[in-house]
Image: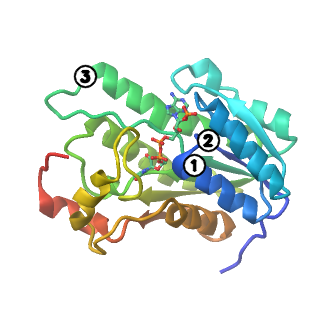
Amino acid sequence: MPETRLQGQTALVTGAAQRVGREIALTLAREGVNIVIHYRSSKDEAESLERELKETGVNSWLVQADFERSLEYENLINRTVEVAGSLNMLVNNASVFPSDTLKSLSRQNLVQSLELNAWAPFSLCRQFATAVGRGKIVNLLDTRVNSYDWTHVSYILSKHVLSEFTRMMAVEYAPDITVNGVSPGLILPPPGKDRSYLKRLEHTVPLKRHGNPNDVAQAVLFLLKSDFLTGTIIAVDGGRHLMEYALGPHPD
Ligand SMILES: NC(=O)c1ccc[n+]([C@@H]2O[C@H](COP(=O)([O-])OP(=O)(O)OC[C@H]3O[C@@H](n4cnc5c(N)ncnc54)[C@H](OP(=O)(O)O)[C@@H]3O)[C@@H](O)[C@H]2O)c1
């Protein structure tokens, strides 16, 4: 399959200051990609990553935006091009993961998850299509878009929306822009939980273990390098997308 050399290109990675986003930024930088680090509140971590990236020899810049404030994301691609001079790739990684069930779901939670996890990434893709016009986009989804999550209802609905946006944009923005998705499974415990969370759920993974941020980053890199994949969603989940329906509701 034809591959693009990414060296010298520039990527915006949202929510890049820590965890999976940080690993994606570091993985792309090792390929010679200049990185625009988007962060919301993790300023210290973002600055530390910026220093680390520069040590690898690439350029790196910071952009701050809260995706709960439309004014802060509606011009983010233009701001990114202004600071970096050019832009070739967009990785929509930033996300929130609130707990709710069908019983507890509130309108406010649903609207917040949809805005942060679906509308803001879609807005960035659309800005990218308008302002940049050519390049590659990868959206971070969740393996549970193949099934369900009984205890994160607003979250999984928002990821379903982003998943559909991904397919729609793949067609609409072809042939100049590829739009793909990566659906992680059990990778890191949610913010605030420890690794026992992963241990407790490993039995739900056919490969009987959790993955690592690097597994996700390698899938993002693969999609960004490909010139012939669009509308493709890769599950990085040890096979978990095959299991969820069979499990039924569970307490975690
Ligand atoms: N971790 C997993 O096992 C797993 C599993 C399935 C899917 N995923 C998906 O993979 C991606 C990365 O996962 P992760 O666990 O590393 O994500 P995360 O730590 O939960 O969130 C990533 C970043 O999102 C940013 N963010 C949160 N609220 C924001 C807001 N209002 N405005 C702008 N940015 C905001 C935060 O930036 P600041 O820190 O700067 O505030 C945060 O560091 C996500 O899309 C997630 O849904 C992850």
The residues tagged by marks 3 and 2 sit, at their Cα atoms, a distance apart of 29 Å
| Mark 3 neighbour class, 10 Å CA radius: few under 14, some 14 to 19, many 20 or more | few
Q: SS for tag 2?
A: loop
Q: Are marks 2 and 1 in contact (CB under 8 Å)?
A: yes
Q: Give the residue type that dot 2 points to.
A: Ala
Vertical relation: 176 (above or below) 116? below
Give the image location of residue 225, x and y in percent: 68, 68
Q: Give the residue type that dot 1 points to.
A: Gly
Residue labelled 1 has its Cβ within 8 Å of some atom of ligand 1: yes
The residues tagged by marks 1 and 3 sit, at their Cα atoms, a distance apart of 28 Å
137 sits left or right of 187 in the view: right
Residue 121, quarter of the rendered image: top right
**Residue holding disc 1:** 21
Q: Which part of the image, by quadrant, shows the N terminus?
A: bottom right
Q: Are marks 3 and 2 in contact (CB under 8 Å)?
A: no
Q: SS for tag 3?
A: loop
Q: Are marks 1 and 3 in contact (CB under 8 Å)?
A: no
Toward the viewer: 158 or 67? 67
Question: Does the image show residue 137?
Answer: no
Give the image location of residue 156, x and y in percent: 32, 43
Vertical relation: 54 (above or below) 221? above
The residues tagged by marks 2 and 1 sit, at their Cα atoms, a distance apart of 7 Å
- The answer to which of marks 1 and 3 sits earlier in the sequence is 1
Q: Give the residue type that dot 3 points to.
A: Ser
Residue labelled 2 has its Cβ within 8 Å of some atom of ligand 1: yes
| Mark 2 neighbour class, 10 Å CA radius: few under 14, some 14 to 19, many 20 or more | many
Give the image location of residue 160, x and y in percent: 36, 46
Residue at (13%, 50%) from the top-left corner? Answer: 250
Q: Nearer the viewer, mark 3 or mark 2?
A: 2
**Residue holding disc 2:** 17
**Residue holding disc 3:** 106
| Mark 1 neighbour class, 10 Å CA radius: few under 14, some 14 to 19, many 20 or more | many
